[in-house]
Image: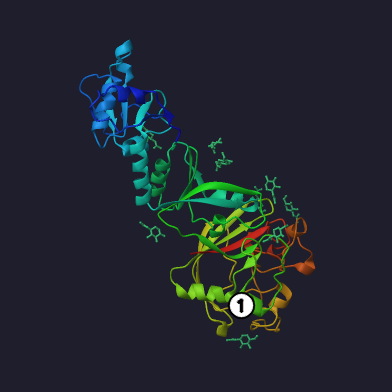
């Protein structure tokens, strides 16, 4: 909020004679709406600015005032109808859609109200670092609120929207985040400078999406054996897999209340995603069988992660083949919960542009594929390897 210090402050102090109690109000100009924004108190007779300020100072609930200048304009006297407002009325009711005359607000009372208001709604301030390649994804969940210009107005808007998990409040710009943030956005990745930094507030929750699997480049091979898939590998902010044991532990700890999201980015930077709920990955003794999941469509991404329930994870060195000819799917297509064989390749080989748009036949189905979402100008869905893939799990 941009408050301008007003010379009016000295007028308030002067109007109290020596020996009188000094007013505690520090009045600052509030670029709000002077028309009654709510149930403000109203003086019956026109008063001067000084009188109006004194009336406000005497009321513990008064945090802002306005003088109805329209009915005055009589020069020195500046008589007008005085309106007194609570902090809540001033902060939530006065917004950028109100132009023209200015109201006056006590910054002390407004800021203490703001502190209490934010605490009551469990608001936490954080900085989020969004890598270049995820700015588009982040933007897909932001709803700009052009009519909201105060921080608590922004939080109030978020509280009204059930899907809202936080806000980006920039100076006087409010945007609501309509899904949970990604946990890794709260840390600056090592050795990166090209990041968009946002002033972010979580609202009512501190949950975030943890990265389970992330594919961003060909810098790390995912053609690995069972032992590594069991424990996980890679770096958390880059190409990464949290590991099958992690997945088993996390899904079996809350088998009927977990939430995953799959994010896919095409090479033209179009972003699609969907949710997977209540995923259950069984223990290593079952070869990390996927035993349950519920698909929840959202923005375009189709259910291709699993071929069905009760399929084992398979690497080159472990996992049962379900192919009648005994083909080892992982050998040809890299690991996955295969069923002779797969519709998606979260652990596939990363292909670069432009090869990835239509990989050679020898590499068919080996890439970061998502068969039902591939562009329709290729031979089949297994020839397109995506630019970025991420599997996330809500904390
Ligand atoms: C802005 O203030 C006006 C007048 O008080 C009110 O009618 C309107 O609903 C407010 N808009 C928002 C988005 O808070
Ligand atoms: C927030 O403000 C900073 C600095 O003014 C700017 O660089 C950034 O783009 C803004 N972000 C948004 C989402 O408006
Ligand atoms: C606020 O949003 C407007 C419109 O999106 C943008 O032009 C302006 O740069 C933003 N201001 C800040 C400080 O981010
Ligand atoms: C960051 O960069 C420096 C210098 O290039 C290098 O020595 C260091 O290992 C890097 N750190 C990480 C975590 O990559
Ligand atoms: C990130 O984006 C900025 C601005 O668009 C660009 O200059 C920079 O090269 C990008 N960095 C990477 C690693 O893509
Ligand atoms: C705020 O959120 C955190 C994390 O979700 C939770 O542990 C805490 O109880 C919440 N506090 C209030 C006052 O709701
Ligand atoms: C796990 O896979 C191995 C082959 O690598 C197989 O011998 C074993 O029977 C499988 N376990 C189960 C429970 O099917
Ligand atoms: C990007 O490519 C996908 C797949 O072909 C297509 O569905 C989408 O419309 C494209 N987006 C844009 C902006 O061209
Ligand atoms: C499919 O269309 C896209 C966008 O026009 C193009 O970039 C790509 O090369 C095409 N792929 C094939 C196999 O023709």
Which residue reaches farthest front? 19
Position of residue 228 relative to residue 108, above or below, is below
- Asked where in the image residue 18 lies, by quadrant, the reply is top left
- The foreground one among 371 and 187 is 187
Position of residue 348 relative to residue 185, above or below, is below
Position of residue 175 relative to residue 340, above or below, is above
Q: Position of residue 84 (x, y in %)?
A: 27, 30
Q: Is residue 353 left or right of residue 240?
A: right
Q: Residue at x 35, y 42 (%)?
A: 112
Q: Position of residue 349 (x, y in %)?
A: 72, 67
Q: Position of residue 45 (x, y in %)?
A: 21, 20
- Mark 1 sits on what residue? 230
Which residue reaches farthest top? 75
Label 1 CA crowd tier, 10 Å (few <14, some 14–19, many 20+)? some
Q: Is residue 98 left or right of residue 305?
A: left
Q: Does the image show residue 8?
A: yes
- Asked where in the image residue 303 lies, by quadrant, the reply is bottom right
Does dot 1 land on a helix, a strand or a loop?
helix
Q: Is residue 67 left or right of residue 125?
A: left
The N terminus appears in which quarter of the rendering? top left
Q: Position of residue 288 (x, y in %)?
A: 57, 79
Q: Does the image show residue 338?
A: no
Q: Is residue 294 left or right of residue 195?
A: left
């Amino acid at each position: 909020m941009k408050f301008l210090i007003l010379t009016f402050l000295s007028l308030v102090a002067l109007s109290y004679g020596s020996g009188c109690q000094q007013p505690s109000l520090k009045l600052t100009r509030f670029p709000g709406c002077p028309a009654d924004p709510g149930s403000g108190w109203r003086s019956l007779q026109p008063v001067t600015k000084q009188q109006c300020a004194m009336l406000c100072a005497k009321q513990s609930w008064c945090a802002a005032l306005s003088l109805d200048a329209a009915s005055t304009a009589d020069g020195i006297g500046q008589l007008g109808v005085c309106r007194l407002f609570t902090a809540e009325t001033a902060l939530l009711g006065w917004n950028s859609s109100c132009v023209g005359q200015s109201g006056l607000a006590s910054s002390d009372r407004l800021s203490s109200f703001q502190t209490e208001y934010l605490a009551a709604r469990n608001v936490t301030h954080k900085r989020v670092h969004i890598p270049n390649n995820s700015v588009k994804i982040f933007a897909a969940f932001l709803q700009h609120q052009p009519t909201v210009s105060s921080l608590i107005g922004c939080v109030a808007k978020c509280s009204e929207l059930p899907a809202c998990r936080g806000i980006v409040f920039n100076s006087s710009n409010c945007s609501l985040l309509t899904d949970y943030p990604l946990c890794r956005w709260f840390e600056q990745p090592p050795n990166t400078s090209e990041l968009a930094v946002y002033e972010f507030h979580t609202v009512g929750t501190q949950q975030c999406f943890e990265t389970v699997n992330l594919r961003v480049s060909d810098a790390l091979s995912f053609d690995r054996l069972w032992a590594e898939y069991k424990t996980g590998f890679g770096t958390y902010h880059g190409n990464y897999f949290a590991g099958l044991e992690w997945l088993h532990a996390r899904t079996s700890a809350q088998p009927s209340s977990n939430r995953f999201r799959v994010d896919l980015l095409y090479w033209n930077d179009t972003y699609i995603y969907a949710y997977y709920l209540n995923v259950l990955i069984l223990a290593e003794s079952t070869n990390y069988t996927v035993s349950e999941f519920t698909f929840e469509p959202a923005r375009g991404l189709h259910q291709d992660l699993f071929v069905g329930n009760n399929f084992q994870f398979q690497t080159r060195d472990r996992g049962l083949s379900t192919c009648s000819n005994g083909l080892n799917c992982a050998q040809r297509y890299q690991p996955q919960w295969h069923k002779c064989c797969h519709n998606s390749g979260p652990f596939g080989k990363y292909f670069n542009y432009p090869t990835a748009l239509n990989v050679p036949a020898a590499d068919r189905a080996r890439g970061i594929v998502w068969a039902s979402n591939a562009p329709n100008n290729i031979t089949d869905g297994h020839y397109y390897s995506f630019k970025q893939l991420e599997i996330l799990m809500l904390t």
